[in-house]
Image: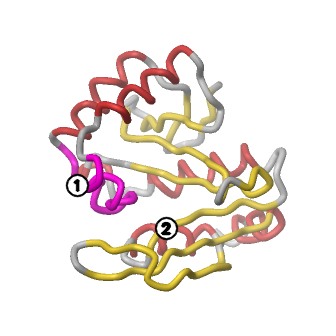
């Protein structure tokens, strides 16, 4: 599967991508401070994560796609998962580990493309983060998501408590917001 707009392409993982994952989880690790940092603190060994990414080469998933810039640079991934195990509530996420690829509109372009794809079969999408991840909160709001749940002091990061946040957007709201770009 390939999804494309003028900024990014979303595609299945390739064997060549694994070198980037190794680099991102051992050298360029800054993204780990934002994407569920409590998970990386509990298990700083990236082996399981890399093995999971490798497994997607043999069994590609349309719910986890790689982000490639229009000039062919692999810069991260989008994925989706069930909110609290509820298959009727699909949440989306994104990671762009290279600092050099940030603040260029790639995350917005990638999530917009992914949401368009998922809204073919869904009426509502969710995203989740923690109150310390101000970048993801801003991106969610720019995309039109609204906060629907806040769990007080759910996460403990760098010596501070943070709230767990869940956002939602309907298909109608998404396309209305997209028309206002």
Q: Quadrant of residue 21?
A: top left
Where is residue 140 drawn, in percent x and y? 55, 69
**Nearer the observer, 149 or 11:** 149
The residue singled out by tag 2 in the image is 129
In 3D space, how far apart are the residues under numbered discs 2 and 1 (Cα atoms)? Answer: 17 Å
Residue occupying image coordinates x 65% and y 32%: 62
Where is residue 40 drawn, in percent x and y? 30, 52
Q: Secondary structure at mark 1?
A: helix
The residue singled out by tag 1 in the image is 30
Compared across the picture, whether 180 is left or right of 34 comes to: right
Q: Residue furthest bottom?
A: 152
Compared across the picture, whether 99 is left or right of 154 comes to: left
Residue occupying image coordinates x 84% and y 58%: 123
Look at the picture and state if 135 lies above or below 121: below
Q: Assign the N terminus to one quadrant of the image.
A: top right
Verify CB contact (< 8 Å) between mark 2 and mark 1: no
> Which range is magenta?
28-43
**Nearer the observer, 137 or 46:** 46
- How is the structure coloured here? secondary structure
Q: Residue furthest left?
A: 27
User: What secondary structure is the stretch in magenta mostly built from?
Assistant: helix
Where is residue 152 drawn, in percent x and y? 50, 85
Where is residue 30 drawn, in percent x and y? 22, 54
* Between discs 2 and 1, the one toward the N terminus: 1
Q: Secondary structure at mark 2?
A: strand
Residue occupying image coordinates x 78% and y 70%: 173
Mark 1 burial class by Cα count in 10 Å: few <14, some 14-19, many 20+: some
Look at the picture and state if 2 lies above or below 16: below
Look at the picture and state if 107 lies above or below 166: above
């Amino acid at each position: 599967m390939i999804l494309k707009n003028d900024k990014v392409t979303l595609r299945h993982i390739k064997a060549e991508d694994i070198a980037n994952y190794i680099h991102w989880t051992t050298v360029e690790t800054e993204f780990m401070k934002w994407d569920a940092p409590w998970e990386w603190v509990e298990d700083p060994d990236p082996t399981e994560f890399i093995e999971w990414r490798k497994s997607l080469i043999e069994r590609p998933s349309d719910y986890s796609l790689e982000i490639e810039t229009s000039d062919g640079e692999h810069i991260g991934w989008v994925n989706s998962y069930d909110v609290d195990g509820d298959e009727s509530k699909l949440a989306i996420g994104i990671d762009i580990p290279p600092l050099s690829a940030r603040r260029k509109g790639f995350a917005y372009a990638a999530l917009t493309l992914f949401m368009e794809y998922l809204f073919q079969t869904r009426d509502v999408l969710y995203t989740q983060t923690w109150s310390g991840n101000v970048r993801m909160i801003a991106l969610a709001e720019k995309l039109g998501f609204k906060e629907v749940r806040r769990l007080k002091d759910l996460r403990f990061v760098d010596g501070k408590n943070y709230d767990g946040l869940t956002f939602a957007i309907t298909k109608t709201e998404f396309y209305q917001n997209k028309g206002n770009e």
